Image (cartoon, rainbow, N blue to C red):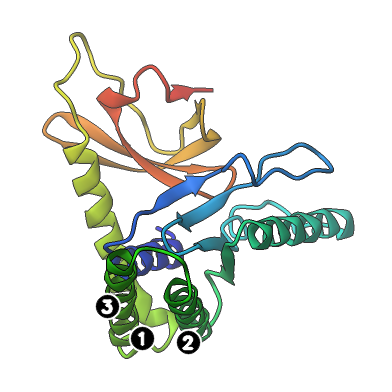
């Protein structure tokens, strides 16, 4: 299990509770004008103009370190992503999930402080402004409370476990009635393809009342969990 990725996803989910969020989204306005490629954000909180980009997701999955050309292209993409966000009034927070946790907490705190200032001086209706400021105030309090409990990367494991529990619960809540006929059976390390997320590898399996909860690490570095009977037509071996 990639403890750092799971842990920071859980921490972000808890800190930003109460705000509308779009996860692993590629908004049409975030299009690289030089290539036409739509870039992605791991999190977008449109009510408060905040976005998060998790970096380092592929570092442990890559077979070889990136060469100078790959690094230059990646940095160029990141610069375009940040510029387009700024042009659309969005503050982009970027951090490597393997960095020292306190630096990441400082980055998140800076983003929340920025959002509070933006909301306070916005032309939103007074009632909406007061409500959003209170949500952001609670978010800062939760962040500070978690920060007091996480000092080094070793302290992240409990939060990673909580994220796995959350993902399993979400998968169950999204489940509909099982389809007729045999359910697909995935096996550990199987290569699979998804129409939205591309190719990846099955990295974990769990039983859920005769169904399978399938964890896939896609080649992009992103990890997703699915209930097998819900993705029988989408998640295919390759």
Residue pointed to by mark 1? 147
Q: Residues within 10 Å of mark 3 (few under 14, many from 20)?
A: some
Q: Please provide percent x and percent y for residue 238.
A: 54, 23
Q: Quadrant of residue 198?
A: top right
Q: Residues within 10 Å of mark 1 (few under 14, many from 20)?
A: some
Q: Is residue 95 left or right of residue 217?
A: right
Residue pointed to by mark 3? 138
- Which residue lies at the image location 52% right of the left edge and 69% below the top edge? 97
Q: Quadrant of residue 147?
A: bottom left
Asked if the residues shown at circle 2 and circle 1 are in contact, with their CB atoms under 8 angstroms apart, the answer is: yes
- Which residue lies at the image location 88% right of the left edge and 60% below the top edge? 68
Question: Observer-nearest residue: 178 or 103?
Answer: 103
Q: Secondary structure at mark 1?
A: helix
Distance between mark 1 and mark 3 Cα atoms: 14 Å
Residue pointed to by mark 2? 102
Question: Observer-nearest residue: 110 or 105?
Answer: 110
Q: Earlier in the sequence, mark 2 or mark 3?
A: 2
- Which residue lies at the image location 39% right of the left edge and 38% below the top edge? 188
Q: Earlier in the sequence, mark 1 or mark 3?
A: 3
Distance between mark 2 and mark 3 Cα atoms: 19 Å
Q: Which corner quadrant holds the N terminus?
A: bottom left
- Which residue lies at the image location 49% right of the left edge and 73% below the top edge? 118
**Furthest residue toward top:** 181
Q: Please provide percent x and percent y for residue 96.
A: 58, 70
Q: Secondary structure at mark 3?
A: helix
Question: Observer-nearest residue: 120 or 153?
Answer: 120
| Up/down of 215 relative to 2, above or below | above
């Amino acid at each position: 299990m990639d403890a750092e990725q799971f842990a920071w996803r859980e921490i972000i989910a808890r800190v930003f509770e109460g705000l509308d969020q779009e996860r692993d989204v590629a908004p049409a306005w975030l299009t690289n004008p030089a290539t036409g490629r739509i870039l992605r954000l791991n999190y977008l909180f449109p009510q408060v103009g905040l976005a998060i980009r998790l970096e380092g997701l592929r570092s442990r999955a890559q077979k070889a370190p990136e060469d100078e050309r790959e690094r230059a292209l990646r940095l160029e993409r990141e610069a375009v992503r940040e510029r387009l966000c700024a042009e659309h009034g969005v503050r982009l927070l970027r951090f490597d999930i393997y960095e020292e946790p306190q630096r990441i907490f400082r980055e998140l705190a800076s983003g929340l402080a920025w959002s509070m200032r933006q909301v306070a001086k916005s032309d939103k209706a007074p009632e909406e402004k007061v409500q959003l400021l209170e949500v952001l105030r609670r978010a800062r309090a939760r962040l500070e409370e978690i920060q007091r409990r996480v000092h080094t990367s070793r302290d992240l494991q409990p939060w990673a476990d909580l994220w796995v529990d959350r993902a399993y619960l979400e998968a169950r809540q999204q489940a509909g009635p099982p389809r007729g006929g045999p359910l697909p059976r995935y096996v550990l390390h199987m290569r699979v393809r998804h129409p939205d997320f591309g190719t990846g590898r099955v990295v974990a399996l769990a039983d859920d009342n005769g169904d399978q909860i399938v964890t896939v690490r896609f080649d992009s570095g992103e990890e997703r969990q699915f209930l097998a009977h819900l993705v029988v037509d989408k998640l295919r071996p390759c």
